[in-house]
Image: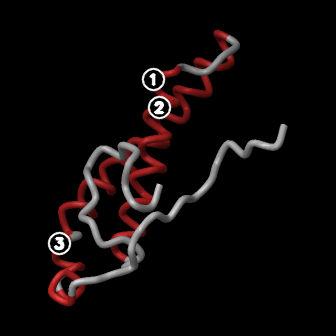
Amino acid sequence: MNERPVRLVVADDLRRRRLTVLFRLLLGVPHFFWWWIWTYAVPFTAIAQWLITVVRGRPSRSLSSFHAHYIRYTAHLTAYMTIVAERYPGFLGHPGYPVD
């Protein structure tokens, strides 16, 4: 079993426009607000996931997907704010961002 369940893939050309770098913190404000809402909800959903796993014997797919989207979105936002990726990230954490 050589396949790793978690990996980081960077597929970006490393070109940056100066204007977007200058205003990156300002452009990130809506994302920080959205990330804060997700971060507030994740502990509650993690507890719910744990209870579901204990009762049913297997985790809920929808909550697992929610947590995966949260982790992916956090990686996208972090990559955008640290100038690793140029493209503006989406708000839902879908795959396909240059850093995934």
In front here: 37 or 87? 87
Q: Residue furthest top?
A: 56
- The residue at the point 30 percent across, 72 percent down is 86
Instruction: Give the alpha-carbon distance from disc 1 to disc 3, as whole Å.
Output: 30 Å
Mark 2: few/some/many CA within 10 Å (<14, 14-19, 20+): few
- Residue at horizontal 16 percent and vertical 77 percent from the top: 26
Q: Please tell me the numbered disc located at residue 27.
A: 3
User: Image quarter for residue 36?
Assistant: bottom left
Q: Amino acid at mark 1?
A: Ser
Residue furthest out toward the front: 13
Q: Badge 3 local density, few (<14 within 10 Å), some, or many (20+)? A: some
| Viewer-nearest residue: 20 or 2 | 2
The disc placed on residue 65 is: 2
Between the residue at mark 3 and the residue at mark 2, the CA separation in whole angstroms equals 27 Å
Q: Secondary structure at mark 3?
A: helix
Note whether 8 is above or below 50 in the view shown. Answer: below
x, y percentage for residue 19?
A: 15, 86
* Mark sitting earlier along the chain (1/3): 3
In the visual, does 4 lie left or right of 88? right
| Mark 1, residue position | 62
Q: What amino acid is found at the position of numbered circle 3 in the picture?
A: Leu
User: Can you tell which quarter of the image residue 2 is in?
Assistant: top right
Estimate the x, y position of residue 42 in percent, counting from the top left.
Answer: 45, 42
Instruction: Locate residue 38 relative to residue 62 in the image: left or right.
Output: left
**Cβ atoms under marks 2 and 1 closer than 8 Å:** yes
Q: Is residue 58 left or right of residue 31?
A: right
Question: What is the C-alpha distance between the residues marked 2 and 1?
Answer: 5 Å
Query: Which secondary structure lies at badge 1?
Result: helix
The label on residue 13 is none
Amino acid tagged 2: Ser
| Crowd band around label 1 with a 10 angstrom C-alpha radius: few (<14), some (14–19), many (20+) | few
**Residue 33 x %, y %:** 24, 59
